[in-house]
């Protein structure tokens, strides 16, 4: 399985391929972010798009509790196939976060992610609306 960071301006077809997954994931977000916001963030390089064969992840850099973090704020993929790829991709995202000077990875998601994320070292650190916040030092 290959994990690749894709610039939307160079990987337009790939971005279009995964857009339905990401749009579906927005339904579970307590943020008011829209599909247009995602596309704009990718074009303006505020967001990074990560892809595997059956999963996609949007990341951004932010400050959280005095730490610089790489936030994995939208993760989705093909039902039944995405989760193993998402979990297998985390070392690459960790390395990327370290290279960019981050203190950790921050994940925002449903409570159902806790079991899978705890296996790879994330801890649930708080709740934000209907979302749970997960953190892992890198």
Image: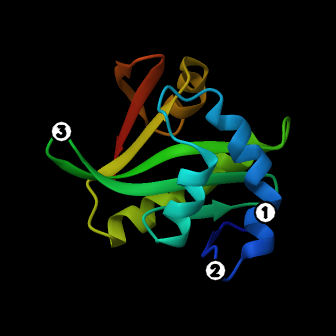
Residue 90 visible? The answer is no
Tag 1 or tag 2, which sits nearer the N-term? 2
User: How packed is label 2: few (under 14 Cα within 10 Å), some, or many (20 or more)?
Assistant: few
- Mark 1 falls on what kind of element? helix
Residue 28 is situated, as x and y percent measured from the top left of the image, at 62, 26
Residue 109 is situated, as x and y percent measured from the top left of the image, at 52, 30
Residue 57 is situated, as x and y percent measured from the top left of the image, at 61, 52
- Circle 3 sits on which residue? 65
Numbered circle sitting on residue 16:
1
Tag 2 or tag 3, which sits nearer the N-term? 2
- Counting the numbered discs, the total is 3
Residue 135 visible? The answer is yes
Query: As drawn, is 101 to the left or to the right of 105?
Result: left
Tag 3 or tag 1, which sits nearer the N-term? 1
- Circle 2 sits on which residue? 9
Q: Distance between the residues labelled 1 and 3?
A: 34 Å
Q: Distance between the residues labelled 2 and 1?
A: 11 Å
Quadrant hosting residue 23: top right
Between marks 3 and 2 in the image, the one whose residue lies nearer the viewer: 2
Residue 90 is situated, as x and y percent measured from the top left of the image, at 55, 53
Quadrant where the N terminus is found in the figure: bottom right
Quadrant hosting residue 79: top right
């Amino acid at each position: 399985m290959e994990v690749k960071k894709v610039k939307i301006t160079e990987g337009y077809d790939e971005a279009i391929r995964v857009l339905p997954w990401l749009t579906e994931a927005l339904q579970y977000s307590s943020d008011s972010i829209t599909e247009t916001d995602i596309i704009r963030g990718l074009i303006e390089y505020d967001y990074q798009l990560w892809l595997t064969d059956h999963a996609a992840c949007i990341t951004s850099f932010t400050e959280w509790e005095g730490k610089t973090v790489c936030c994995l704020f939208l993760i989705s993929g093909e039902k039944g196939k995405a989760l193993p790829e998402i979990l297998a991709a985390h070392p690459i995202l960790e390395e990327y976060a370290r290279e960019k000077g981050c203190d950790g990875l921050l994940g925002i998601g449903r409570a159902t992610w806790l079991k899978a994320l705890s296996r790879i070292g994330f801890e649930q650190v708080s709740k934000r609306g209907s979302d749970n916040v997960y953190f892992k030092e890198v």
